[in-house]
Image (cartoon, helix red, strand yellow):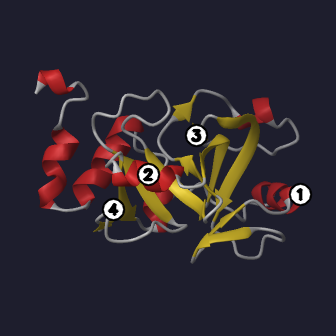
Amino acid sequence: MIRFTPASAVEPKPGQVLLSEPFLEDAYFGRKAVLLCEHNSDSSFGFVLNNYIEVDLQDLLQEMPHWQAKISLGGPVKNSNLYYLHCHEHVPGSIQVKEGLFMGGDFDWLKKAVADGVISDRELRFFVGYAGWTSGQLADEIKSKSWFVADAPIETIMNTQTEDEDYWKELIRSMGPDYAHIANAPSDPSMN
């Protein structure tokens, strides 16, 4: 079960998931879930978890061993760069996002691990670009109720099987029965 943290009650922290409010009209963030990877007084950044793109990893990285997995559009910033999350603490140079979840690291190690079958499809996710906020921007968006802040298990964060909006709906519903109406709200408030 996902634990919901009232936005006004606590400062978000890395490893938490930001869930957009249901009527946010934004191509990158409307009905999206964003894993917060870094949050400090200077800036914040994370990856949109449920905005998949139709591209094969081998089209982006020809030297990568075959990997059959969805790739997410992580956000509008540096969308010519590829980033990845994984569940292996022994990847040299990786950064811990939360206990058991890491970002980046030695790409040669990763390629060998994929080729050797050491990493399963539920332990590795790729993102093109990322979502970023300048100093105070994310705090302002949370105060204006553009985002809900939730804790989600690694299995949920690494899940690429659930489709775009359904992923967001499942996370909202997991916050408890008081939030079911939000998940069921139409994306256009005039349709309510």
Q: Are marks 1 and 3 in contact (CB under 8 Å)?
A: no
Instruction: Decide which of tag 1 and tag 4 comes sooner along the chain.
Output: 4
The answer to whether residue 181 is left or right of residue 49 is left
| Disc 1 to disc 3, C-alpha distance | 21 Å
Q: Which residue is mark 2?
A: 140
| Disc 2 to disc 3, C-alpha distance | 32 Å
Which disc, if any, is residue 70? 3
Instruction: Decide which of tag 2 and tag 4 comes sooner along the chain.
Output: 4
Q: Are marks 1 and 2 in contact (CB under 8 Å)?
A: no
Instruction: Decide which of tag 1 and tag 2 comes sooner along the chain.
Output: 1
Query: Which residue is at 72% across, 48% downward?
Result: 83
Give the secondary structure at mark 1: helix
Q: Residues within 10 Å of mark 4 (few under 14, many from 20)?
A: many
| Disc 1 to disc 2, C-alpha distance | 39 Å
Q: Amino acid at mark 2?
A: Asp
Q: Position of residue 4 (x, y in %)?
A: 29, 66
Between circles 2 and 4, the one closer to the viewer is 2
| Disc 4 to disc 3, C-alpha distance | 30 Å
| Disc 1 to disc 4, C-alpha distance | 39 Å
Q: Which residue is mark 4?
A: 7
Q: Is any atom of residue 159 visible in this view? A: no
Q: Quadrant of residue 103?
A: bottom right
Decide which of 104, 140 is in the foreground and name it: 140
| Disc 2 to disc 4, C-alpha distance | 11 Å
Which disc, if any, is residue 148? none
Instruction: Decide which of tag 2 and tag 3 comes sooner along the chain.
Output: 3
Give the secondary structure at mark 2: helix
Q: Amino acid at mark 3?
A: Lys
Q: Are marks 4 and 3 in contact (CB under 8 Å)?
A: no
Q: Which residue is mark 1?
A: 108
Between circles 4 and 3, the one closer to the viewer is 4
Name the image quarter holding the N terminus: bottom left
